Image (spheres, rainbow, N blue to C red):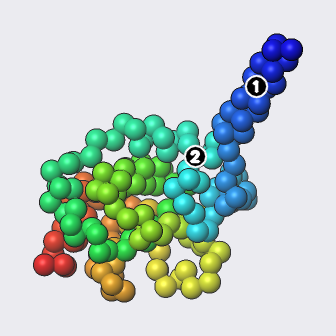
Amino acid sequence: MSGIRINKTLILLFLVSSFILAQESDNKKYDDAKEEDILFGLISEDDFQDKDFSLWYNPEYEEYTVDSLTIANIKEELTDVKIVLVMGTWCHDSHREVPRFIKILKYADYDFSNLTIYAVDGEKEAGIEGFHKYDIKFVPTFIIYNQETEIGRIIEAPENTLEEDLASILLSNLK
């Protein structure tokens, strides 16, 4: 009888682990122009764990070393800002910069309820009414807001590093 319980337990563990490994995002669609599945619309960090996107997201996130000194200097300024992140899962710059940016925000104990992430297709569309107000030309684009006022952007790649560019935006606009 105990052999049956063990087998049922093993089967249940196998099914649960298979489900976790094969996680699919609800925000995924096939992009005919790119000829691949992409994330599209309003997304969350969890969507990067979809099997199609975790292959590039997780290694970049894990391998990146945050500039802890720069982040320590701006951690307080980050508490009151909202950030809109616009990216394309088909874009190599997004593959590099988005996991790094998310790691920086986590390191800074950023309130992720103040972060909005949009995934766009190759036409820079997100399928959301009013999205055009962001005027996205290149991805990724990180838009930093103080209250409702845009105070800066990091577009495609930082001029220096993500940490230094973010510090420059925050310190020149919030002091």
**Label whose residue precedes the other's in the sequence (2 or 1):** 1
| Residue 24 visible in the displayed image | yes
* Residue 82 location, quadrant: bottom left
Crowding near pointer 1: few (<14 within 10 Å), some, many (20+)?
few
In the rendered view, does 149 fall on the left or right side of 30? left
In the rendered view, does 47 fall on the left or right side of 160? right
* Residue 2 location, quadrant: top right
Query: Under tag 2, what secondary structure?
Result: helix
| Residue 34 visible in the displayed image | no
Measure the alpha-carbon separation of dots 2 and 1: 26 Å
Image coords of residue 111 (percent x, y): 38, 65
Q: Nearer the viewer, residue 21 or 27?
A: 21
**Residue 61 versus residue 2 in the image, above or below:** below
Image coords of residue 130 (percent x, y): 57, 85
**Residue 37 versus residue 41 in the image, above or below:** above
**Residue 117 versus residue 127 in the image, above or below:** above
Residue ID for mark 1: 9
**Residue 68 versus residue 83 in the image, above or below:** above
In the rendered view, does 97 fall on the left or right side of 133? left
The circle drawn on residue 76 is: none
Q: Amino acid at mark 1?
A: Thr
Q: Residue at x 13, y 78 (%)?
A: 175
* Quarter the N terminus occupies: top right
Q: Residue at x 76, y 25 (%)?
A: 9
Residue ID for mark 2: 49
Q: Amino acid at mark 2?
A: Gln
Image coords of residue 160 (percent x, y): 22, 56
Crowding near pointer 2: few (<14 within 10 Å), some, many (20+)?
many
Count of picture labels: 2
